[in-house]
Image: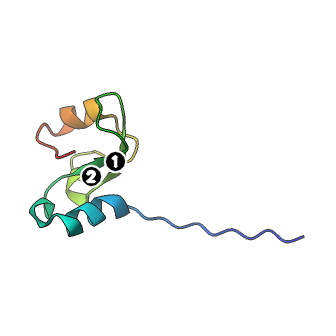
C-alpha cells in the first residue's frame, strides 16, 4: 500500500484574498480571524503585518500589542 500526500502552503492566502476583494486594504498590515473576538488568533497575516512580528496563531491581543493599528 502506498501513501500519497499533498502539502500546500498557502502562506498568507486569506490575507491576500481580502486585499484582492477590498483594494483599500492593499499595502497595509492586516490579519484575518476566524471570528472577531479578542480571545481568538490570526489565521493569516499579510507581509506588512509579518514585518511587525504578527504571524499565524498570534493572538489578537498580542497582534494589537505588536501593531496597534492592525486591521483585523
Question: Which residue does the image show at 28% across and 34% down from the upper left?
Answer: 60
Question: Which secondary structure lies at badge 2?
Answer: helix
Of the residues under marks 2 and 1, which one precedes in the sequence?
Answer: 2
Disc on res. 15: none
Question: Circle 2 sits on which residue?
Answer: 50
Question: Circle 1 sits on which residue?
Answer: 55
Note whether residue 51 is visible.
yes
Please name whichever residue, 36 or 5, is drawn nearer the observer in this view of the structure: 36
Asked if the residue under mark 1 is in contact with the one under mark 2, i.e. CB atoms within 8 Å, the reply is yes
Q: Is residue 18 above or below residue 42?
A: below
Q: Is residue 63 above or below residue 43?
A: above
Image spot of residue 9 (x, y percent): 48, 65
Report the quarter where the C terminus lies.
top left
Image spot of residue 71 (x, y percent): 17, 46
Question: Which secondary structure lies at badge 1?
Answer: loop
Image spot of residue 22 (x, y percent): 16, 63
Amino acid at each position: 500500500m502506498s501513501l500519497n500526500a499533498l502539502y500546500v502552503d498557502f502562506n498568507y492566502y486569506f490575507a491576500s484574498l481580502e486585499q484582492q476583494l477590498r483594494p483599500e486594504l492593499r499595502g497595509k498590515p492586516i490579519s484575518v480571524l476566524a471570528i472577531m473576538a479578542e480571545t481568538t488568533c490570526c489565521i493569516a497575516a499579510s507581509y506588512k503585518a509579518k514585518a511587525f512580528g504578527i504571524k499565524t496563531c498570534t493572538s489578537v491581543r498580542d497582534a494589537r500589542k505588536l501593531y496597534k493599528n492592525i486591521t483585523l
